[in-house]
Image: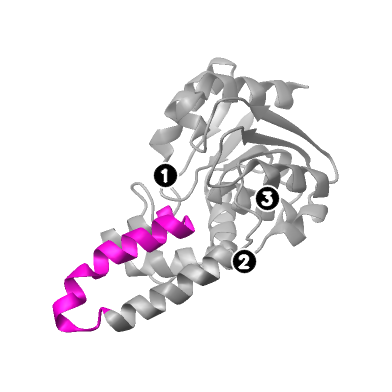
């Protein structure tokens, strides 16, 4: 039983070590690579799109002789996993999407904050006020909810900032009806980064899926409740 797990944005393979141990106790062979730009994996030479990550995962599978496997993706990795399953349906036995970042909806608040940011940049171009720019930027990113991008800004990794812009600009929900694999949608009850209502929409658009809600958990469910998450995965895979 081969299982491939794709971690979320800003995460790494080590953050899934507890889930990996639970799955391996049941005899699974678990593969969790650091996606390019995260963990010990080098940053791409140019900004990547979701398709670039899909192609990288396919190359990883070839190098590790993974021709047929259960595919699991969390958050950003969930979007990559879902799209991979539509491009390479012959390789995915079953699909598990955990708080996947698939729907990209930018409401009025996003555009108001964007306008405020542009205005702020003009004001803070004045030399005496320029020192306030990092603080203002931090406040704006917190308001709009783009905490992942804020981390990249502080780390000054320009390629990954541009990669973040590319992957978040693509709404992946149009690919959901094309997923052929039986799918388990797992959602954290108190997830603020990918709200629970998105889970109902995603589950409704998948042809062959069911949804499980894990109460009391937030976005990083792999760290908060690895045993419960592993149990849900195993139950689905073995059913």
| Secondary structure state at the residue bearing disc 1 | loop
Camera-side residue: 221 or 54? 221
Report if residue 87 lies within the magenta region.
no
Camera-side mark, 2 or 3: 2
Vertically, is 221 above or below 124?
Answer: above
Residue at 41% x, 49% y is: 10
Residue 6: image quadrant is top right
Query: In the rendering, at what x and y percent does residue 57 appear?
Result: 56, 52
Contact check, label 1 and label 3, Cβ < 8 Å? no
Q: Residue furthest right?
A: 207
* Residue 49 shown left or right of residue 236 in the figure: left
Dot placed on the residue nearer the N-terminal end, 2 or 1: 1
Determine the CA span between mark 1 and mark 3. 18 Å
Q: For this view, does 22 lie left or right of residue 119?
A: right
Q: Which label sits on residue 82?
A: 3
The residue drawn where x is 44% and y is 57% is 143
Q: Which residues are magenta?
A: 124-148
In the rendered image of this protein, does residue 222 appear above or below residue 101? Answer: above
x, y percent for residue 163: 46, 66
Lower position in the chain sequence, tag 2 or tag 3: 3
Which residue carries the number 1 mark?
11
Q: Which mark is residue 170?
A: 2
User: Which residue is most to the top?
Assistant: 25
Q: Give coordinates of residue 12: x percent, y percent.
A: 41, 42
- Which mark is drawn over residue 44? none
One can see residue 9 in this view: yes
Q: Main secondary structure of the magenta part?
A: helix
Query: What residue sits 54% from the left and 15% below the top?
Result: 25
- Looking at the image, residue 146 lies above or below residue 193: below
**Disc 1 packing (10 Å; few <14; some 14–19; many ≥20):** many
Q: Between marks 2 and 3, how big is the CA–CA gap? A: 13 Å
């Amino acid at each position: 039983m081969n299982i491939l797990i794709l971690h979320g944005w800003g995460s790494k393979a080590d953050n899934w070590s507890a889930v990996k141990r639970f799955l391996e106790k049941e005899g699974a062979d678990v593969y969790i690579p650091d996606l390019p730009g995260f963990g010990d994996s080098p940053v791409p030479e140019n900004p990547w799109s979701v398709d670039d990550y899909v192609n990288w995962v396919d190359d990883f599978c070839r190098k590790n002789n993974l021709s047929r496997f259960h595919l699991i993706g969390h958050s950003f990795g969930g979007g990559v996993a879902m799209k991979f399953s539509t491009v390479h349906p012959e390789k995915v036995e079953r699909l598990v999407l955990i708080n996947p970042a698939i729907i990209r909806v930018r409401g009025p608040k996003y555009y108001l904050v964007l306008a405020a940011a542009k205005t702020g940049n003009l004001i803070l171009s004045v030399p005496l006020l320029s020192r306030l720019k990092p603080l203002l930027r931090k406040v704006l990113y917190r308001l709009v909810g783009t905490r992942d991008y804020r981390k990249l800004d502080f780390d000054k990794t320009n390629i990954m900032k541009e990669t973040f812009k590319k992957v978040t600009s693509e709404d992946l929900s149009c690919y959901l009806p094309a997923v052929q694999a039986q799918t388990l949608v797992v959602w954290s009850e108190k997830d603020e980064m990918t709200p629970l209502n998105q889970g109902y929409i995603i589950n409704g658009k998948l042809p062959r899926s069911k949804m499980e809600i894990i109460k009391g958990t937030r976005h990083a469910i792999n760290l908060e409740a690895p045993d419960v998450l592993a149990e849900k995965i195993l139950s689905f895979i073995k059913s």
